[in-house]
Amino acid sequence: MEAHGDQRWLVECLTATLDTARDVRAFAEESLRQASLLPGYGAALTKVTINKEIPFGLRQLAAVLLKQFIKQHWQEDEENFVPPVVSASEKVVIRQLLLTSLDDSNGKIRTAISMAVAAIGQQDWPEDWPELLPVLLKLIGDQSNGNGVRGALRCLALLSDDLDDTCVPKLVPELFPSLYRIISSPHLYENSLRAKAFAIVHSCISMLGSMSGVYKRDTASLITSMLDPLIEQFSIVLNSPVQSQNPDDWSMQMEVLKCLLQLVQNFPRLPEAKISAILPALWQTFVSSFKTYHLSYIQGADDLDSVSYDSDGSERSLESFEIQLFELWTTIVGNSRLAKVIGGNIKELAYYTIALQQITEEQVQSWSRDANQYVADEDDLTYSCRVSGSLLLEEVVTAYEDYGIDSILEASQMRFHESRELKEAGSADWWRLHEASLFALGSLSEQLSEAQDSGLTKYNVRDLLEQMLIDIMGTGVHQYPFLHARAFSNVAKFSTVISKGISEQYLCNAAHAIASDVPPPVKVGACRALAQLLPESNQNLIQPNIMGILSSLVDLLRQASDETLHLVLETLQSAIKSGGEQSTLIEPVISPIILDVWAQHIADPFISIDAVEVLEFLGHQEFSWMLTATCFSNPPNNWIHFSETQGPARWTGCRFTGPFDDGTQTAVVKAVFDTCFVSTVQIVLESDDHGEMQNATECLAAFISGGQQELLVWGGEQGHTLKMLLDAASRLLDPALESSVSLFVGSFVLQLILQIPLHLSPHIPDLIAAIVRRMQTSSITGLKSSLIVIIARLVHMSAPNVDGFINLLLSIPAQGYGNSLVYIMSEWSQLQGEIQGAYQIKVTTTALALLISTRHPELSKVEVQGHLIKTSAGITTRSKARVTPDQWTKIPLPAKIFSLLADTLAEIQEQIGAGDDDDCEEDSDWEEVQNGDASISDDIIHSASVPSIANPSVEHLNAMAKVFDEDDDDSYDDDLTKTDPLNEVKLADFLTNIFANLWENDRPMFEYLCQGLSDSQRSAVEQVLRR
């Protein structure tokens, strides 16, 4: 943009974007878009933003566009970058203009400018913008310029997360006096400004805490210099009672709580007297905030529909304030020195904690409307006062043991008696305290059950629980549903503690509840009780009622969904198991319903697994293959609907495994193939849905694994199935696709290599070229690693002519590199340490060994990344990273491979070193490995020209290598690769022979490669050579 007249044009254009005529607005918006690509546009926006003569609305619009401009054009390596990048000269102009306008008199404009300064500072400070902090400190220190103080504090608050260990020690002594003056001057600065000052103090304490491990003396000195004045101000702030749910009224207290949390967490050895001095004020905040929370949240006296959030996106609510308090108390209790200080007040702490765990009115409304939400909130550690309070009580038990348990039991008993008094006084909310007391005890069920068994506690857990539970029996289930639900839940948790009579009474009540018209939370609690009590109860009591229980659960199954469905299925399992022979009578009714549940929720692994387990309890042990065979080869009517709604790419639970012979498996796989193979391939070729394509890819891998070579003749016309598989591979390796879509292509292509290698051989050059293109456009390490595994398996497939495979890579071009060998080995050598999985590590490690064993002359011409060159100390900021990016040495490929192999050998030896200290049972496992097959595949040895040598260390290394040779029965990838002969290779043997062969046959090269090893790597190699 031209220097002259740019403001006038921009103001006119901004005005036009607000025009009522649509075509005028559209033209103006397009003009602005085109202008954003021209030099000077950012500076022009800045000038309009800071020009006080321009109407406020246009200035604000310019500020919004400026923020967007900075986000898109300031830095090239940012995720949201849009070319062109702002020139260095224009950046200087924008930074100078913004800094001089941080004291704008309009609050909204000042905030916008502060945010723009912070956004630039996060990119440029300190290296490219060293004057930023001095200007901000000068503004903060100028007491006469209130607007400047506000603007500078806003900037510092946004920048504080980018403070590093090099600037904090210098910054804190300069900054703290100004911050302290703001914090301690309520007559000069409003609370919001003081809260921002506290927030910056919090960031400084946090950074000092992260530095304390390395710079212990320096950080301790800095903290000590600030501690006395800070504690004094903390006490003053916390002594102010919390009287409103409005966040603006307690924002300073919130920041003080965060500061205290950082102090206690990061500086646990601070003088007890310092922290003790603030405890009375902290208790005052705890008690006063509870009163406000009780009125606003538990009783629901205030409107809570609107929730505000701070600049970081964190919720600003009184509940979040209470949770912050709980976190601080939990940290104090967990500090052994501070725990002694508050030991005399633990009962009172538990007393108020239980009261804060009462169900709020909002929860009553939410859980009454949605049983799924109730179950989810009960099962998950949700962000709430109830959960945070439970975590505090658990810490109390851990810190104070029997004394802590007695304190909690006494506090629970006191709250229970209070609920009784409220009930007698006619209060409608009496049940909340009763339920909260039960909830608190239930959250400690394991610890309290152990205490009851030990008999060391002052209070009797059984007596208190039974008293609470008996009182509930006489109340109305419709009037107090959550109280009854909690009773059922606690009976399940304390089934080994409470008496048999009460347990059986609640079992009967639960059976009646699931068959009655009671509120959903009651049925949830009843299911929990049944799931726990049925297997433990007297069969004479169960058998007369089991058919009714099963029928009621089947009815619930038809009504349940999501979270409740999981619970009902779990309860049904217990009921079927307890029903014995009677359960078989209802099997014809239950099985079709469970099959339908499985079909409707096949994409949900938890529900589908629950459904499978129910069928297995009914006697369908063959379910894993029977369901596949029957549903696909002879689909029922409802299966058509399932296929239409779920699609074959959603069958994530289908695996072709089960208790059948090879002939049965082939028949099952063919039945599935005939029904949905073509549609699965079509999804890969045509779908744009990432999840569908990922699941379809996994299905294709399973097809190949299950059908093997026979699968190629199932598609009718010769070569048709192979063509479809290759087309699918081509689409998945398309470099234009997003990386996440191709995430499982590695498993798919690996099956092609393992199951149909002869048919795949003619297509290997094209496959490698496609893999290279896909890797070069991928940003996901997992995808690149899986494709490296493919290349590694192709190395093995080429044996004994590995030289020929290297020549093939040399003939395939790679963009930006001389050839595919250079590119692939550059990536492989960097990512070898990122590869996960026993099979994957074994395949890639042995393939590297095969490559280096060829001694191919072209390998030495390839240079790859070596070691990191340390250029500076301290934390690396974004601007520092751009100025001094990481630098690495370059080393020849054979040296890198040799180093990687030595790393693996050292890791194996480390594993056995750790194993030497284990118990006898683990030693016996090692012996089993040693006595197992330690042979190496003749083909692999031949391909590498490695002679078999007798070495005393080999058998010992077999035991070391157990960690690499173990199979994970739960891994789907392991199921697909378990037939690969490479699984039989003992990695320790293989590496031993590789090093021994090189040492014996090419001593100069061996000694040259050893020069680049670290001490630990060299020691590992020497250990196997001298045995």
Image (tube, grey):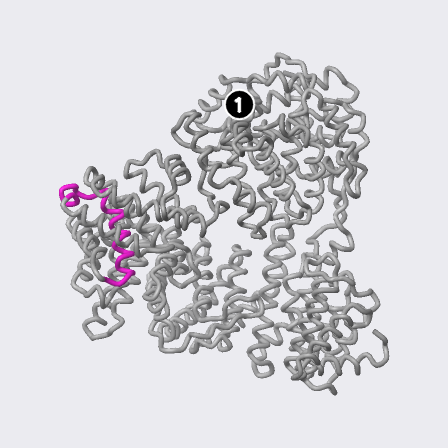
Which stretch did the figure color magenta?
Answer: 518-543
Q: 994 or 510, which lies in front?
A: 510
Query: Which quarter shows the C terminus?
Result: top right
Task: Classify 791 as above or below 391.
Answer: above
The spot of residue 382 in percent (x, y) is: 42, 59
The amino acid on which the numbered mark 1 sits, given as a three-letter code, is Ala
In the image, farthest residue toward the front: 717
The spot of residue 272 in percent (x, y) is: 49, 59
Q: 583 or 1006, which lies in front?
A: 583
Magenta span includes 349: no
Magenta span includes 529: yes
Q: 208 or 23, which lies in front?
A: 23
Residue at horizontal 22%, vertical 39%?
A: 584
* Quadrant of res 186: bottom right
The answer to whether residue 5 is seen in the rendering is yes
Total numbered badges shown on the rendered structure: 1
* Residue at the spot of label 1: 959
Q: Magenta: predominant secondary structure element?
A: helix
* Quadrant of res 417: bottom left
Dot 1, how many residues are within 10 Å of its Cα: few (below 14), some (14-19), or many (20+)? many
Task: Classify 7 as above or below 807.
Answer: below
